[in-house]
């Protein structure tokens, strides 16, 4: 039997950051994962520290745009008919979250969570000994023309309202930033104060190593359930043993719902499966995070070459990856950057843990003292990992000032 003051379930970027932060603050912590740290969704993301992304995914008008996207074979959104009944309750909530009043509330909460993300990651990368993993060259969003940019006007207005600085630029300035920018993009928006992690998996590993170099413990276990123990703490049960802890943090990404449901906590959590294509080369045709907005695809200069990340696929936690989704990303990449033709690449699929209003649930459970949630970071879990860890650690130490989250 393993015992600790706090057990953190899930060693993705969120759980690893939490365990490290707790341990740094003197809380005896055990981190638990069924696999190797960082091998879940945090393995293959696009590495963008996007503190400017305050616009939730469900924006006013989203319902009108979905049928057109679903109809196109190379659409960034894919929902197989057989999965529709499963996804429908979540999609209904998603559409309801696109009401202006909800959007404004979500944007304010996202802005709060994202605040200081770039500075915090810079400090963390230094602290864990991998400062070279970050590039601080901003993010460039590319549009074909003004009409396309106007289609996203509501999201850019929200950024403005939250004090985020960005610059609209034309073709010449795009080329000054990115000389190989594809010819069909004439309008750009440059957000200078953004960063990129050039190897998200190595980043998780570096934080994990630093955690272990301190007093941090790790247990390899597939937690089957979490129950109140006789001494008012918690027991985590797994096939290879039990773990006793006074506090538990559930940070199990898209799998968190299964652990929380028996405790009466029904999170509206859905996996949005995303894909990446990782070209294997020394160099990349872009020097910073570049977003091709029409394909909703992120082009990132990783340590091992260009990574193209994107796609939202609704198909649940158990279905095999769909090779067609990754093939679409590879085709777009080669079309836009013909020099990639013939380069070898690897593909990957990960489960983004998504809430309908885009806002993760971070803090103590309202129902169960000693149970903490760090769940639902969706498309921005890397960005918000450090902020989440600080919120949980401060909350646990102070046990005050938390707003009810309804779960
Ligand atoms: C294609 C793509 C691109 C992305 N790009 C970005 C980006 O540029 N910027 C950004 O900020 N975010 C991005 N994201 C989102 C980001 O990757 C996720 O939000 C983040 O990785 C979620 O982290 P997590 O720790 O919550 O989950 P995960 O990394 O999935 O970790 C959860 C862990 O819990 C463990 N676990 C689950 N159940 C149990 C159990 N019962 N017992 C023990 N262990 C368990 C799993 O093994 C896993 O290791 C992207 C995602 C995708 C798919």
Image: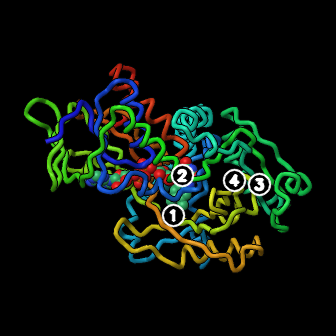
Q: Is residue 12 left or right of residue 238?
A: right
Task: Report which residue position mark 2 lands on.
Answer: 200
Front label number (1 vs 4): 4
Counting residues from the start of the chain, the first of labels 4 and 3 encountered is 3
Q: Are marks 3 and 2 in contact (CB under 8 Å)?
A: no
Counting residues from the start of the chain, the first of labels 1 and 4 encountered is 1
Front residue of 340/64: it is: 340
For disc 2, does the CB lie below 8 Å from ligand 1? yes
How was this image coloured? rainbow
Task: Report which residue position mark 1 lands on.
Answer: 274
Counting residues from the start of the chain, the first of labels 2 and 4 encountered is 2
Give the class, few, some or many, for how many residues have Cα within 10 Å of label 2's Cα (few <14, many ≥20). many
Task: Report which residue position mark 4 lands on.
Answer: 289
The residue furthest left is 230
For disc 1, does the CB lie below 8 Å from ligand 1? yes
- Classify the position of the C terminus by image quarter: top left
Q: CA distance from mark 2 to mark 4?
A: 14 Å
- Residue 73 percent location from the top left of the image: 59, 79
């Amino acid at each position: 039997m393993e015992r600790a003051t706090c057990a953190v379930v899930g060693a993705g970027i969120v759980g690893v950051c939490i365990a490290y932060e707790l341990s740094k603050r003197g809380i005896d912590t055990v981190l638990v994962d069924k696999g190797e740290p960082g091998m879940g969704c945090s393995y293959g993301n696009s590495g963008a520290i996007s503190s400017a992304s305050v616009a939730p995914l469900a924006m006013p008008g989203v319902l009108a745009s979905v049928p057109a996207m679903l109809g196109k074979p190379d659409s960034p959104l894919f929902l197989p008919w057989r999965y529709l009944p499963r996804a429908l309750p979540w999609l209904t909530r998603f559409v309801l979250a696109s009401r202006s009043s909800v959007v404004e509330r979500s944007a304010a909460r996202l802005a709060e969570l994202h605040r200081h993300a770039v500075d915090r990651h810079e400090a963390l990368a230094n602290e864990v000994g991998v400062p070279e993993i970050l590039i601080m060259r901003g993010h460039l969003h590319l549009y074909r023309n003004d009409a396309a940019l106007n289609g996203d006007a509501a999201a850019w207005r929200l950024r403005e309202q939250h004090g985020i600085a960005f610059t609209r630029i034309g073709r010449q300035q795009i080329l000054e930033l990115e000389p190989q920018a594809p010819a069909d993009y004439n309008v750009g928006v440059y957000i200078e104060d953004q960063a990129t992690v050039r190897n998200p998996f190595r980043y998780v590993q570096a934080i994990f190593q630093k955690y272990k170099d301190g007093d941090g413990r790790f247990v390899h276990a597939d937690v089957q359930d979490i129950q109140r123990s006789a001494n008012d703490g918690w027991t985590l049960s797994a096939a290879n043993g039990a773990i006793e802890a006074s506090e538990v943090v559930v940070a199990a990404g898209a799998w968190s719902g299964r652990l929380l449901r028996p405790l009466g906590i029904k999170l509206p959590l859905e996996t949005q499966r995303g894909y990446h294509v990782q070209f294997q080369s020394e160099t990349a045709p872009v020097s910073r995070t570049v977003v091709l907005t029409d394909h909703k695809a992120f082009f990132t200069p990783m340590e091992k070459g260009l990574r193209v990340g994107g796609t939202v696929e609704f198909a649940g936690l158990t279905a095999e990856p769909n090779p067609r989704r990754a093939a679409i990303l590879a085709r777009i990449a080669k079309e836009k950057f013909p020099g990639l033709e013939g380069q070898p690449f690897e593909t990957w699929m990960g489960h983004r843990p998504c809430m309908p209003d885009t806002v993760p649930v971070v803090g103590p459970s309202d129902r169960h003292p000693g149970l903490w949630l760090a769940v639902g970071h969706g498309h921005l879990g890397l960005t918000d990992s450090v902020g989440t860890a600080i919120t949980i650690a401060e909350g646990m130490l102070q046990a005050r000032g938390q707003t009810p989250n309804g779960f």
